[in-house]
Image (cartoon, rainbow, N blue to C red):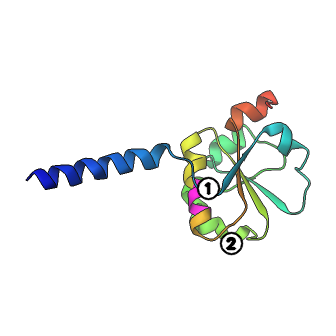
Amino acid sequence: MENILVIILAAVFYLLLKRIMPVVGVRHKTPAELKVKLKDKDMQFIDVRPSDAFRQDYIPGFENIPLNELSAGIQKLERGNEIVLISDNPRGMKKASAKLKRRGFRYVTTVQGGIESWQEGGN
């Protein structure tokens, strides 16, 4: 019985730790670093917010592939390009970046501070 409790506690600890740890191999860049690269042909800027939020608060240069449609929309992405992800939800960016890394995308970047930071012109 004691062993089962230890296993359950270890599993819970692992799941909690996994939620807060960053995704390995994902870069994090400031809006200032990325805004100058919006026209770069080797980068794709993807907004993973739901479509209605994207339409309401469109950011020029970003394409919308909602997180819940990312698996289906993955064929729009070039594996050799740097994929830049933005959202209004840090967990959404983390989930999207983890999904892309699992699918073999090597160059995945998230916008530090997300939409709010981008709109403020954050550094």
Q: SS for tag 1?
A: helix
Which circle's residue, 2 or 1, is located before the other in the chain?
2
Q: Residue at x 69, y 44 (%)?
A: 54
Residue range in magenta is 96-100
In this picture, residue 55 sits left or right of residue 99: right
At label 2, counting other C-alpha atoms closer than 10 Å, the crowd grade (few under 14, some 14-19, many 20 or more) is: few
Residue type indicated by callout 1: Ser
* Residues packed near mark 1 inside 10 Å, few (<14), some (14 to 19) or many (20 plus): many
Query: Which three-letter amino acid code belongs to the residue tagged 2?
Result: Gln
Looking at the image, residue 78 sits to the left or right of residue 70; the answer is right
Please state which of residues 31 and 54 is positioned toward the viewer in this rendering.
31
Eye-nearest disc, 2 or 1: 1
Q: Is residue 37 above or below residue 70?
A: above
Is 98 magenta? The answer is yes
The image quadrant where one finds the C terminus is top right
Q: Quadrant of residue 117?
A: top right
Q: Position of residue 109 (x, y in %)?
A: 71, 52
Classify mark 2: helix, strand or loop.
helix
Q: Residue at x 70, y 36 (%)?
A: 115
Spatial distance from mark 2 to mark 1, Cα to Cα?
Answer: 15 Å
Query: Considering depth in this image, is 28 or 53 the residue closer to the camera?
Result: 28
Residue placed under numbered mark 2 in the picture: 75
> Residue 39's spot in the image, x, y percent?
92, 54
Instruction: Read off the residue under disc 1.
Output: 97
Chief SS of the magenta region = helix
Please provide percent x and percent y for residue 32: 85, 37
